[in-house]
């Protein structure tokens, strides 16, 4: 970072020269007790919010209290440095970015100061996440009314700054409707307590308002979601001269919020969800306003474009989600059924089960991320995310909106708060070229005119920010916008607070975050098929909705375990994506692939792949991490752990061939020797080294085959060792069992159990070939010549997982090509490949075809891979598993959740009488991650998040399931509990049933 920086930038605000950054940072460190970060990482993490915009700040301060806030304002005022308040960073209009000092309220000022059920109020600090307030209010039958879809990570301060709303606004209004008092510090250091009756008004505000009463009474459109501009009409005497309400939606431009008194509402004891299907979105929109007299809690709309296949919605092209409440489930259901009768629908569904309702709501809440890709994979962006019109005019507005899109050859999928006339939409703007940005501007101007023609507001929820503030004169006229500027001057005469927002705004096509990215694609190792092979597009997937920043997860969700362990933005998926974006930009992170900042952020990424499925935008940070490590260590010395654990399959095969398992186990149990070995290998000293099996799985297999000749079969050898003619298998009869490294050398009992179950189900089991020709094609299944056998070399299949996770991608490709050579006869025979280790199955499903996109065999092997449960379901559908009839606990493997899915496992468990649900999250060991030096505490914290509590709460007769070797190892080392693969549980039940006969 340079010592001096231009703080004026293009904000249009103060900061007319240059500031001594080192002196500014030093002054802040002396003045505040909270953290002060002027390093590259701290700045890179807040260059963007969830909008199209990017600004590089000078530094970031995490204040501990109001005194810290006041101190920051004093230091920055003396130097003319702008100050921007930031909560969860989920703003979609750019208002949470700035070029001066960013105040991060999410570290310390996160308290729920007081909750008073009697008065139905709560006192909150600005960094408190909404869900934490809801959790505290729920036992009292209360809740905070507004609930944006980002409720798991948005903060109360951000909601007040944007006047956020959410899906329940038809019942409980906007955030401004829920605010009673606000504690604010102005840019000049005055501490004000804002409320009704001019309470806390800065000098000059009353005179300003009382001199413009006529304009305030006539200049604002009357609609429920009018968020644009300053809410100066709240200062009218007939509205109680409510200074607190007028402050809401000011986007941090008037003062810095330090505390708020908010109103709570009664939460219905029971709820029902009526899902109403319509032919198209316009029909749904026209119906929405007619449902409002029936008193629904929500009237949300979305079209089929955003709904995943198999979502379970009634048949139609668009839907309204209409929630009702009541004192009892029957009362809530009756109200929902009344709405169904009143609605002219194509089809309908009433859902009363809370879990089923949550699943359906998740579809709606994830739309902000899923809408970032059109059905054909084209990128789509915010910019016209939330304009609002009177609800009765929504249907007509949508038709004209669609026509305007077509006229500009653009596409978008509207969804949102149909009951309030508020529409969210992401449009496939081309923001990468000059021509595309020009079209973005022209469309924005014309759409603003269309919204105004329908009596609407440019913003109906997310604020104006940079995205829309330039167009406010089209909505309000020049004189009202001039009044906004005068109000800003009353509160902030030095234009210190978030300059460039709302008044004297930056242009809507400036500061676009895409403009700094390289013009040409960068060379990469993975194919990135969903992003056209372009790593820039892959990184752009992160649009900042920050679902990865949730501190609690429910159900099977995984993302993001490292953030939940540390609470640090740089250890979230979004934080890492921001650093990668800045790495590509090159003006803040200047070392490219060699960047220590990016390496530091990725170091605690567990490569759990949870973001691949849980991120609504489909960010795949595990792949990005492997890509980065591949480039970062090119022609450089790698950490010891990359050699010891990244090349684990090689070491274990060598130990097996040399018959060293007993010796190595003895040495690993000898503390001084083990300590030295762990130090040299880069292994955490807190870890125990897993014991090697005295006999490998394939060793057991060979002995078994020798004892029972003729049993089983292989498309390239009956024992997996010798080539043989390719058989023509009966469909569902022959399967190839993959001897992954963990099953082979560390847990052969899992492979043995799988063989027992698969054969009991009527399947014939074989292992992959192990002879690799030096020349020619012994793998054709027909070559039997002595010369071919003599020149062949023995090899083993491998998924390449350990090489991929450590970024050794060249080596991974070599290993995978060798594997494909070995598997050719299996692929030609069309035999399914059963993979017991979920992480290995996931690597073969995804990493293999993405690393070898030009080898058609890679796609064929990827398609042939089945999990244990999938194999039984597809190839032994009439087999009935043995009855276990016990409860289960444990964890679904993170890679299984993210890549493979666990629906067949759930059905198999149910058929065997295994009751209960497995937890989500990640075990924290995650292959090599938890064994690497410096990772133990985070690894343990991840296990304590979901896995270990679920196991501790289990009854004595509970079966602890853990299909992954890492999960079982973590359970053993941290809890002294033995976890078992589902195959082991079923095999044991089979043996028990046989013994009872």
Image (tube, rainbow, N blue to C red):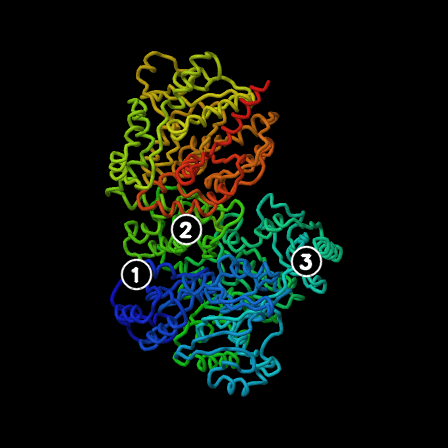
Asked whether 512 or 561 is in front, the reply is 561
Left of 469 or right of it: where is 215?
right
Does residue 343 appear anywhere in the picture?
no
Q: Which residue is mark 3?
A: 324
Left of 121 or right of it: where is 541?
left
Asked whether 936 or 647 is in front, the reply is 936
Say few, some or many: other residues with alpha carbon within 10 Å of mark 3 (under 14 / 14 to 19 / 20 or more). Answer: many
Residue 302 quadrant: bottom right
Nearer to us of marks 1 and 2 is 2
Q: Which residue is mark 1?
A: 39
Above/below status of 697 relative to 123: above
Left of 629 or right of it: where is 438?
right
What whole-number distance in Å separates the C-alpha atoms at marks 3 and 1? 50 Å
Q: What is the total number of numbered labels drawn onto the structure image? A: 3
| Residues under numbered marks 1 and 2 in contact, where contact means CB atoms less than 8 Å apart | no
Q: Which residue is mark 2?
A: 565
Q: Secondary structure at mark 1?
A: loop
What whole-number distance in Å separates the C-alpha atoms at marks 1 and 2? 23 Å
Write the residue at 39% across / 18% down.
721
Q: Which residue appears farthest toward the front when viewing the image? A: 956
Of the 4 image quadrants, the one containing the N terminus is bottom left
């Amino acid at each position: 970072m340079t010592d001096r920086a231009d703080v004026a930038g293009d904000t249009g605000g103060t900061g007319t020269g240059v500031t001594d950054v080192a002196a500014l940072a030093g002054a802040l460190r002396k003045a505040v007790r909270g953290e002060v970060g002027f390093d590259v990482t701290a700045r890179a993490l807040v260059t963007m919010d969830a909008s199209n915009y990017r600004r590089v700040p000078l530094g970031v301060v995490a204040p501990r209290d109001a005194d810290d806030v006041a101190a920051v304002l004093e230091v920055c005022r003396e130097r003319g440095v702008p100050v921007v308040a930031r909560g969860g960073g989920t703003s979609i209009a750019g208002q949470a970015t700035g070029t001066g000092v960013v105040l991060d309220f999410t570290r310390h000022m996160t308290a729920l100061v007081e909750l008073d059920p009697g008065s139905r109020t709560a006192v909150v600090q600005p960094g408190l996440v909404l869900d934490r307030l809801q959790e505290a209010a729920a036992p009292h039958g209360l809740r905070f009314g507004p609930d944006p879809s980002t409720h798991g990570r948005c903060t109360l301060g951000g909601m007040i700054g944007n006047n956020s709303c959410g899906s329940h606004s038809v019942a409980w209004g906007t955030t401004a409707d829920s605010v009673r008092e606000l504690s604010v510090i102005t840019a000049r250091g005055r501490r004000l307590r804002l409320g009704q009756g001019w309470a806390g008004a800065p000098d000059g505000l009353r005179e300003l308002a009382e001199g413009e009463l006529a304009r305030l009474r006539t200049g604002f459109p009357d609609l429920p979601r009018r968020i644009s501009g300053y809410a100066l009409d709240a200062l009218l005497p007939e509205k109680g001269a409510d200074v607190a309400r007028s402050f809401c939606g000011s986007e941090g431009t008037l003062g810095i919020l330090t505390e708020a008194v908010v109103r709570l509402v009664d939460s219905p004891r029971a709820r029902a969800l009526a899902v109403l299907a319509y032919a198209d979105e316009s029909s749904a929109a026209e119906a929405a306003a007619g449902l409002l007299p029936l008193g629904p809690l929500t009237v949300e709309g979305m079209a089929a474009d955003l709904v995943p296949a198999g979502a379970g919605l009634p048949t139609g092209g668009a839907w309204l989600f209409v929630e009702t409440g009541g004192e009892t489930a029957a009362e809530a259901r009756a109200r929902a059924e009344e709405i169904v009768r009143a609605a002219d629908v194509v089809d309908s569904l009433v859902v009363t089960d809370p879990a089923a309702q949550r699943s359906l709501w998740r579809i709606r809440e994830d739309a902000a991320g899923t809408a970032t890709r059109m059905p054909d994979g084209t990128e789509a962006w915010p910019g016209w995310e939330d304009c609002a019109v009177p609800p009765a005019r929504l249907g007509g507005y949508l038709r004209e909106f669609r026509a305007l899109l077509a006229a500009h050859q653009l596409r978008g999928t509207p969804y949102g708060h149909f009951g309030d006339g508020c529409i969210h939409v992401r449009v496939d703007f081309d923001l990468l070229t000059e021509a595309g940005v020009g079209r973005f501007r022209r469309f924005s101007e014309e759409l603003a005119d269309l919204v105004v023609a329908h009596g609407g507001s440019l913003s109906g929820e997310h604020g104006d920010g940079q995205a829309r503030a330039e167009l406010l004169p089209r909505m309000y006229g020049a004189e009202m916008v001039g009044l906004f500027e005068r109000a800003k001057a009353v509160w902030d005469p030095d234009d210190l607070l978030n300059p460039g927002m709302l008044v004297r705004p930056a242009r809507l096509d400036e500061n676009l975050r895409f403009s700094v990215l390289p013009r040409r694609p960068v060379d990469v190792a993975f194919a990135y098929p969903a992003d056209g092979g372009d790593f820039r597009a892959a990184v752009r997937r992160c649009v900042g909705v920050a679902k990865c920043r949730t501190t609690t997860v429910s159900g099977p969700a995984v993302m993001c375990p490292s953030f939940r362990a540390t609470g640090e933005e740089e250890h979230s998926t979004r934080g890492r994506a921001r650093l990668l974006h800045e790495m590509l930009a090159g003006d803040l992170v200047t070392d490219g692939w060699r960047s220590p900042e990016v390496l530091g952020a990725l170091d605690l990424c567990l490569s759990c792949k949870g973001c691949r499925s849980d991120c609504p935008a489909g960010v795949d940070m595990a792949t990005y991490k492997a890509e980065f490590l591949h480039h970062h260590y090119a022609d450089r010395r790698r950490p010891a752990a990359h050699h010891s654990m990244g090349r684990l399959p090689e070491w274990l095969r060598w130990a097996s061939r040399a018959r060293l398992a007993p010796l190595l186990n003895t040495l690993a149990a000898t503390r001084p020797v083990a300590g030295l070995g762990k130090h040299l290998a880069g292994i955490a000293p807190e870890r125990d080294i897993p014991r090697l099996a005295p006999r490998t799985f394939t060793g057991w297999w060979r002995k078994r085959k020798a004892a029972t000749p003729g049993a089983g079969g292989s498309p390239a050898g009956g024992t997996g060792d010798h080539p043989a003619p390719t058989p023509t298998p009966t469909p569902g009869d022959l399967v190839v069992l993959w001897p992954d490294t963990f099953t082979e050398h560390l847990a052969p009992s899992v492979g043995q159990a799988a063989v027992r179950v698969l054969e009991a189900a009527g399947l014939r089991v074989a292992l992959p070939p192990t002879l690799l020709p030096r020349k020619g094609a012994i793998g054709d299944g027909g070559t039997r010549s002595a010369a071919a056998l003599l020149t062949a070399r023995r090899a083993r299949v491998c998924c390449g997982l350990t090489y991929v996770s450590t970024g050794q991608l060249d080596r991974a490709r070599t290993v995978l090509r060798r594997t494909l050579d070995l598997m050719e006869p299996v692929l030609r025979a069309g035999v399914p490949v059963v993979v017991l280790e979920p992480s290995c199955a996931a690597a073969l499903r995804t990493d293999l075809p993405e690393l070898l996109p030009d080898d058609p065999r890679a796609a064929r092997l990827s398609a042939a891979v089945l999990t244990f449960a999938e194999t039984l379901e597809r190839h032994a559908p009439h087999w009935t598993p043995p009855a276990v009839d016990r409860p289960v606990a444990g964890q679904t493997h993170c890679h299984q959740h993210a890549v493979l899915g666990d629906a067949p496992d759930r059905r198999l468990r149910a058929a065997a009488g295994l009751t209960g649900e497995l937890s989500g999250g990640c075990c924290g060991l995650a292959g090599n991650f938890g064994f690497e030096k410096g990772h133990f505490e985070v690894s343990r914290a991840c296990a304590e998040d979901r896995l270990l509590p679920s196991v501790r709460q289990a009854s004595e007769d509970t079966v602890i399931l853990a299909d992954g070797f890492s999960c079982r190892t973590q359970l053993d080392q941290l809890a002294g509990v033995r976890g078992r693969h589902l195959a082991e549980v079923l095999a044991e039940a089979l043996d028990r049933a046989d013994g009872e006969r």
